[in-house]
Image (spheres, rainbow, N blue to C red):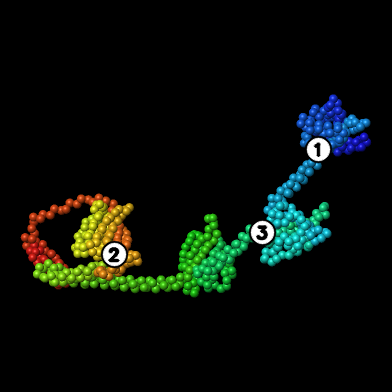
């Protein structure tokens, strides 16, 4: 009992509690209880002595402690931790024997609440440290030198050491790393030996490293890049010395840096391949990029790197009018809008300067300037303008010549045609003479058409072709053209089939005279280039706001290569027929001047089809027209000199022609 008495006294002095219990009526009854812990739990001895566990503890807590009571009463000492009312304590139960039988159990409880709090805090700190280490993106390991050999003991402090660096906790030396196929290089690509590694140098010389860039080559993983820190580690309590090494995998960053360097070099090479000069400035108007073409253009010495960071306005001395250059820079600084300006350098180069502001996500970051040497272009422009003036003068001279010649040519031609027509009306000529007269008329009419076509073409080229757009009905115009050309068609045994009656009440926008000229040109070609006993089909249809006319023949067609040039001036479809080759060119211009389009489709042997379209007028129904009533009962020809005709003509043959035509008309006097 002496030993127990000493422990009891010690327990009482350690802010503990001592209690005894025995068994009575199969219940454990406490016979003694005292100590500082008793009072801290809110009890007094009288609350415990003479009572069971269930009398002062909650049932579940009492039932848990009862199991230990049973073990101790069974003769086995036991120790357990318990917690109640905010206190942690250790309980020890020791049985007391008499004649080999347990007669009493002495329990001691020591308050360990403060120690428990410290242990929990220490555990929390350890857990937090472990969590921090495991959640870090860096890898951390400890290197310690083995005193028995040259091996280095590596202790991985988090999983990234294995995941990112590829090594586990263990012993390593130069040979083991080589066996693993691991080699190291520095940032410049120079190999690092085992003894050049930061951790080894720190362990050997005590030198710390911060952000040391190194690469690790592994035959299985390829190249990886790391930023390494190392510093000496010393724990005197555990008598441990070594090196604490941390590293971060910067492979992605390094590869991005390499790509940026390559992109910069590529951009630089690309800029240097441009013929135009380019330079870029930041918001402060400092040059951030400039190509070799710009240096040559501005006659600047050195290479592009020498001008990086140069204040752009300081280059004003290059230009003849520096104030224009400086004003231009100040203007774009305010407006930040794309613009173009011409600048002249001191060496007489004329440069076109294009400005483009640079924005990223809506924020202004700088300026781009592109300079193009247009000196030769300007010289050519001056030469072209002079040539244009000469050409315009020549064209005006040609127009004046044609205008004057048209009068000089048509005046005698009218006389030839007029007297030939008079001879045609005479009855006394035999067949040979009549054929000769027809040849005169044919040649004269062809010459007149040639003159008119050339004059129209000249007016088109000069922009003097007059087109009076109005509401017209095509049916009357088309019928007139068919009547005019029917004799020629009959002579060639060609049938003209007008299939436009369904649309004759549709009014269109156009010039009646020019539309007639178009119909005559297209129908004349369809007859001339048709085969004997052929047909000419005239159809039309509506397409949106246009009337589309189609004139199709059954001739030999137009070769594909000629179809592309059929509307070019002086292109003849065949040398077998008379013509100037400008009729279709004039036709195209006439159609376009009336707001329409024209085209051709053809298949050789089958024939060809010319189509053109003109806009529909707003008024689509033809208005009835009542002809003025003419009193045909009045016989003017019986009234001598009822009318007088004024004819102004300086050509004597033409005056004689009119006199002959009016001879025999007593009501008309010239």
The label shown at residue 556 is 2
Determine the image quadrant of residue 20. top right
Q: Residue furthest bottom?
A: 347
In the rendered structure, find residue 221 and report the number of the disc placed on it: 3
Residue at 30%, 56% in the rendered image: 548
Residue 355 pos. (x, y %): 49, 63
Task: Depth check: give the residue in front, 304 or 560.
Answer: 560
State the residue at coordinates (69%, 59%): 227
**Element assignment for label 2:** loop
Mark 3 to mark 1 CA distance (whole Å): 53 Å
Q: Nearer the viewer, mark 2 or mark 3?
A: 2
Q: Report if residue 9 is visible in the image.
A: no
> Can you say whether 389 is above or below 590 in the image?
below
Quick one: SS at disc 3? Answer: loop
Bin the neighbour count of mark 3 within 10 Å (Cα to Cα): few under 14, some 14-19, many 20 and up: few
Labelled pair 1, 2 in contact (Cβ < 8 Å): no
Q: Nearer the viewer, mark 1 or mark 2?
A: 2
Mark 1 or mark 2: whose residue is earlier in sequence: 1
């Amino acid at each position: 009992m002496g030993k127990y008495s000493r422990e009891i006294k010690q327990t009482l002095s350690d802010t503990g509690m001592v209690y005894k219990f025995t068994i009575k009526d199969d219940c454990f009854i406490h016979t003694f209880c005292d100590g500082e812990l008793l009072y801290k739990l809110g009890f007094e001895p009288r609350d415990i002595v003479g009572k069971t566990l269930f009398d002062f503890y909650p049932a579940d807590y009492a039932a848990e402690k009862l199991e230990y009571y049973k073990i101790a009463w069974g003769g086995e000492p036991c120790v357990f931790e318990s917690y109640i009312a905010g206190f942690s304590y250790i309980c020890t139960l020791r049985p007391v024997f008499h004649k080999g039988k347990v007669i009493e159990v002495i329990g001691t409880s020591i308050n360990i609440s403060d120690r428990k709090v410290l242990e929990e805090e220490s555990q929390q700190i350890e857990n937090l440290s472990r969590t921090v280490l495991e959640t870090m993106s860096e890898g951390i390991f400890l290197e310690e030198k083995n005193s028995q050999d040259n091996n280095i003991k590596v202790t991985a402090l988090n999983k990234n050491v294995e995941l990112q660096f590829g090594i586990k906790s263990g012993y390593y030396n130069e040979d083991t790393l080589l066996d693993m196929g691991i080699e190291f290089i520095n940032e410049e690509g120079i190999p690092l030996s085992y003894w050049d590694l930061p951790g080894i140098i720190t362990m050997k010389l005590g030198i710390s490293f911060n952000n040391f860039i190194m690469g690790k080559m592994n035959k299985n993983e390829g190249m990886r890049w790391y930023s390494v820190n190392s510093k000496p580690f010393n724990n005197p309590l555990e008598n441990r010395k070594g090196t604490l090494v941390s590293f971060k995998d910067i492979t992605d960053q390094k590869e991005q840096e390499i790509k940026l360097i390559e992109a910069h070099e590529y951009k630089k090479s690309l800029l240097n391949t441009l013929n135009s000069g380019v330079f870029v400035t930041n918001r402060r108007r400092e040059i951030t990029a400039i190509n070799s073409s710009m240096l040559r253009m501005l006659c600047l010495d050195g290479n592009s790197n020498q001008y990086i960071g140069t204040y752009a306005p300081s280059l004003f001395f290059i230009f003849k009018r520096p104030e224009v250059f400086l004003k231009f820079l100040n203007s774009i600084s305010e407006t930040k809008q794309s613009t173009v300006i011409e600048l002249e350098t001191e060496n007489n180069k004329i440069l076109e300067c294009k400005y483009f502001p640079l924005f990223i996500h809506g924020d202004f970051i700088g300026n781009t300037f592109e300079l193009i040497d247009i000196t030769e272009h300007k010289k050519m422009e001056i030469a072209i303008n002079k040539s244009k003036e000469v050409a315009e003068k020549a064209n005006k001279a040609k127009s004046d010549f044609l205008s004057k010649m048209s009068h000089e040519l048509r005046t005698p031609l009218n006389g030839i045609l007029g007297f030939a027509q008079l001879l045609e009306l005479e009855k006394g000529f035999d067949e040979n003479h009549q054929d000769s007269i027809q040849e005169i008329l044919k040649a004269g009419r062809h010459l007149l058409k040639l003159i008119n076509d050339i004059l129209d073409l000249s007016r088109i080229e000069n922009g003097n072709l007059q087109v009076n757009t109005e509401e017209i009905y095509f049916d009357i115009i088309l019928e007139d053209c068919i009547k005019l050309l029917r004799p020629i068609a009959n002579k060639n045994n060609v049938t003209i089939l007008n299939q436009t009656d369904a649309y004759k009440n549709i009014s269109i926008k156009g010039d009646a005279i020019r539309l007639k000229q178009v119909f005559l040109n297209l129908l004349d070609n369809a007859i001339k280039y048709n085969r004997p006993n052929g047909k000419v089909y005239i159809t039309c249809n509506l397409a949106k706001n246009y009337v589309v006319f189609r004139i199709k023949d059954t001739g030999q067609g137009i070769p594909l290569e000629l179809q592309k040039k059929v509307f070019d001036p002086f292109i003849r479809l065949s040398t077998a027929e008379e013509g100037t080759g400008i009729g279709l060119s004039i036709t195209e211009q006439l159609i376009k001047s009336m707001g329409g389009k024209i085209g051709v489709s053809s298949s050789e042997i089958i024939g060809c089809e010319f189509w053109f379209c003109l806009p529909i007028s707003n008024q689509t129904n033809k208005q009835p027209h009542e002809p003025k009533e003419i009193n045909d009962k009045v016989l003017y020809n019986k009234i001598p000199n009822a009318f007088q005709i004024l004819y102004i003509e300086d050509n004597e043959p033409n005056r004689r022609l009119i006199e002959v035509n009016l001879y025999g008309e007593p009501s008309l006097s010239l």
